Image (cartoon, helix red, strand yellow):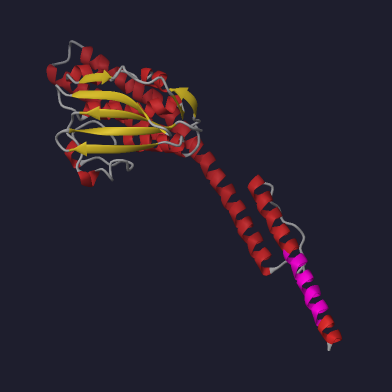
Amino acid sequence: MAIVCMILTAMVLLAAGTLYWRTRRLLGRLDHMLESAMDGHFSESEYTEDMLSRLEARMYQYLSMDRQDRKETAKERDAVKSLVSDISHQTKTPVANILLYSQLLQENESLDERARQIAGQIEMQTEKLNFLIQSLIRTSRLENGIVAVVPKEDRILELIHDLPHPASAQAKGVEYHIVEEMPDICACFDRKWTVEALSNLVDNAVKYTPPGGKVTVSVQEYEMFVRIDVADTGIGISEEETAKIFARFYRSPHVQEERGVGLGLYLAREILHREGGYIKVASVPGEGSVFSVFLSKRA
């Protein structure tokens, strides 16, 4: 009886050992597959039925499909890059010429007042078209990786000083104020793209603030983030709209008469997301809004 038990024990141990080594070889093979796929060097190998488990075969099938999908995605991205480049190049000269001719028409003294007004409308609509084209090009370049957001440690004060003064503020009678008592601190951001995001917020604030109102930019430091507030005394945003305003092409029915295409806030959010930050809004209809940009202090 003891001999039988010993034989059974030996058989169990042998089976367990065989299963262990087969499992180990399988896991090793799967690990090699995944590592090759992540490095971009995954290729088909020779397998025999006694070596390849069902799980291994399915893993190979999945990785092969994923590799093909990535090739197709790369091809589509290259096509988009080419299209965006063509649009940018092909529209630049016609738009510039239309603007030039419309301005020349307005300066032509032989035209009557009605004709000058029409020329002025042509100029205004062409500027809107150019604004739309440039907004779409910037958004497409960012979304398709044609240009990358590369955050690095930088000074917040220099970022704020790089913000262009909104030309429309003075013409509209809106006070634009940057709080000077700012902490000299650093955060991680891409200065060029973050200036783009903040400028969109400032332009929006001025656009939706009536004459006599005020737009203020301030900075506050936290342990993990730096917060930049763009506050205005404008028309405000209703609670049900705060979840919609960052969507691409969304425009409130209350501001349809204002210039814009609904890309500014969407682009700002995308930029901040890609550099590890985020944006929040607090608003009271009729009293104003505060758009808060949070930039990480660590890479």
Tell me if residue 65 is in the magenta stretch. no
Estimate the x, y position of residue 12 in percent, counting from the top left.
78, 77
Q: Residue at x 23, y 26 (%)?
A: 206
Image quadrant occupied by the N terminus:
bottom right
Tally of numbered discs: 0
Foreground residue among 260 and 273: 273
Q: Residue furthest front?
A: 2
Tell me if residue 22 is in the magenta stretch. yes
Q: Residue furthest bottom?
A: 1
Dominant secondary structure, magenta: helix
Which image quarter: residue 294? top left
143 relative to 165 in the view: left or right = right
Q: Residue at x 30, y 24 (%)?
A: 218
Estimate the x, y position of residue 122 in percent, counting from the top left.
24, 25
Answer whether residue 121 is visible to the viewer in this image: yes
Foreground residue among 21 and 198: 21
Query: Over which residues does the magenta segment extend?
Result: 8-23
Q: Residue furthest right?
A: 3
170 relative to 34 in the view: left or right = left
Estimate the x, y position of residue 34 in percent, counting from the top left.
66, 53
* In this view, 7 is above or below 44: below
Foreground residue among 139 and 17: 17
Estimate the x, y position of residue 181 in percent, counting from the top left.
32, 18
Foreground residue among 62 and 122: 62
Which image quarter: residue 289? top left
202 relative to 16 in the view: left or right = left
* In this view, 295 is above or below 159: below
Answer whether residue 256 is visible to the viewer in this image: no
